[in-house]
């Protein structure tokens, strides 16, 4: 089982999860041309993708989904609330799921996780192949007990480290945007992500990836330091899913 990022941040997000011949795309927040270009960088094309899963309706997660799905005749999975909020995108093949029920696409088992975010019915995911678990957790304003239970004992974790709290407070955003980003339905700070890690069973963890970093209110060094301290590892062991470079394939075995 393996995973990679096509890019992560406020300008676009997309993640690949692959196991036993099934390759899923989580979010599709770049233009069609950009998604295709970034797939080539990872040795994949649209023909290799089995389905798209959408976490929520914000543009940086759904921008290219309808056109990409139409070109490659792909089903799009999302909660009913997300589909309702994405009505203008006119998806051709819709597969609603409940955040309360696990499901499978090909060889990959999918456990949706409801999260607190300022979207209609957002979800994050834990993916499995029967032996391994890959957690993808971004775009939530605070950590709930349900999130802690759901993301325990992962073999790999892609975790939001959106902002450094001091940088957000002193940074260039207007007060309303600062309040949104740092609010209960906004985005996880480095400190919040570290607090979550401290509550998780990390005994199986092979990969830890900081994702959805703000380009103005955070830095890779800040995110790495926070996660490494919480996980008890070297800062260099914490990977970054960058906005432009994404993250190359990481194997879970």
Image (tube, helix red, strand yellow):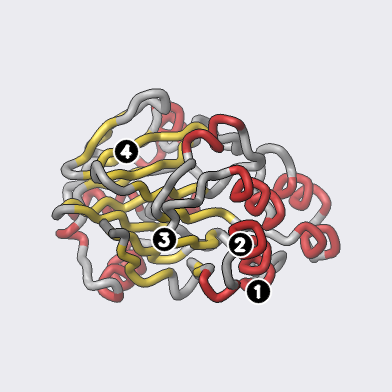
* Local SS, label 4: strand
Q: CA distance from mark 3 to mark 1?
A: 20 Å
On screen, residue 243 versus residue 178, left or right, reads left
What's the residue at 38%, 57% (across, down)?
Answer: 15
Circle on res. 110? 4
Q: Which residue is mark 3?
A: 206
What's the residue at 63%, 49% (across, down)?
Answer: 198
Q: Nearer the viewer, mark 2 or mark 1?
A: 2
Which one is earlier in the sequence, the residue at label 3 or at label 1? Answer: 3
| Quadrant (top left/top right/bottom left/bottom right) for the N terminus | bottom left
Residue 5 can be seen, yes or no: yes
| Quadrant (top left/top right/bottom left/bottom right) for the C terminus | bottom left
Q: Position of residue 55 (x, y in %)?
A: 44, 42
Q: Residues within 10 Å of mark 2 (few under 14, many from 20)?
A: few
* Local SS, label 1: helix
- Are the residues at dot 4 and dot 2 in contact (C-beta closer than 8 Å)? no
Which one is earlier in the sequence, the residue at label 4 or at label 2? Answer: 4
Q: Position of residue 227 (x, y in %)?
A: 62, 61
Q: Which of 143/204 is in front?
A: 204
Circle on res. 221? 1
Q: Is residue 35 above or below residue 61?
A: below
Q: CA distance from mark 1 to mark 4?
A: 32 Å
Which one is earlier in the sequence, the residue at label 3 or at label 2? Answer: 3
Q: Which residue is mark 2?
A: 232
Q: Quadrant of residue 13?
A: bottom left
Q: CA distance from mark 4 to mark 3?
A: 19 Å
Q: CA distance from mark 3 to mark 2?
A: 13 Å
Q: Residues within 10 Å of mark 1 (few under 14, many from 20)?
A: few
């Amino acid at each position: 089982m393996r995973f990679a990022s096509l890019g992560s941040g406020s300008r676009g997000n997309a993640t690949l999860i692959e196991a036993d011949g099934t390759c899923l795309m989580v979010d599709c927040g770049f233009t069609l041309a950009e998604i295709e270009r970034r797939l080539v960088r990872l040795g994949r094309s649209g023909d290799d993708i089995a389905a798209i899963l959408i976490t929520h309706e914000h543009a940086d997660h759904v921008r290219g989904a309808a056109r990409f799905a139409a070109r490659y005749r792909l089903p799009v999975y999302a909660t009913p609330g997300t589909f309702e909020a994405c009505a203008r995108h006119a998806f051709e093949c819709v597969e609603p799921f409940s955040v309360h029920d696990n499901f499978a696409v090909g060889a990959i088992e999918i456990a949706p996780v409801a999260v607190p975010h300022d979207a209609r019915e957002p979800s994050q995911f834990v993916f499995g192949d029967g032996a391994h678990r890959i957690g993808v957790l971004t775009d939530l304003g605070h950590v709930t007990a349900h999130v802690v239970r759901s993301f325990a004992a992962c073999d790999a974790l892609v975790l939001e480290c959106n902002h450094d709290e001091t940088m957000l407070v002193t940074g260039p955003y207007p007060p309303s945007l600062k309040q949104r980003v740092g609010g209960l339905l906004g985005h996880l700070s480095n400190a919040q992500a570290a607090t979550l890690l401290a509550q998780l069973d990390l005994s199986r963890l092979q990969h830890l990836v900081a994702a959805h970093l703000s380009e103005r209110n955070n830095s890779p060094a800040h995110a790495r330091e926070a996660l490494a301290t919480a996980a008890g590892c070297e800062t260099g062991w914490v990977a970054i899913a960058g906005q432009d470079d994404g993250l190359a394939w990481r194997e879970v075995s």
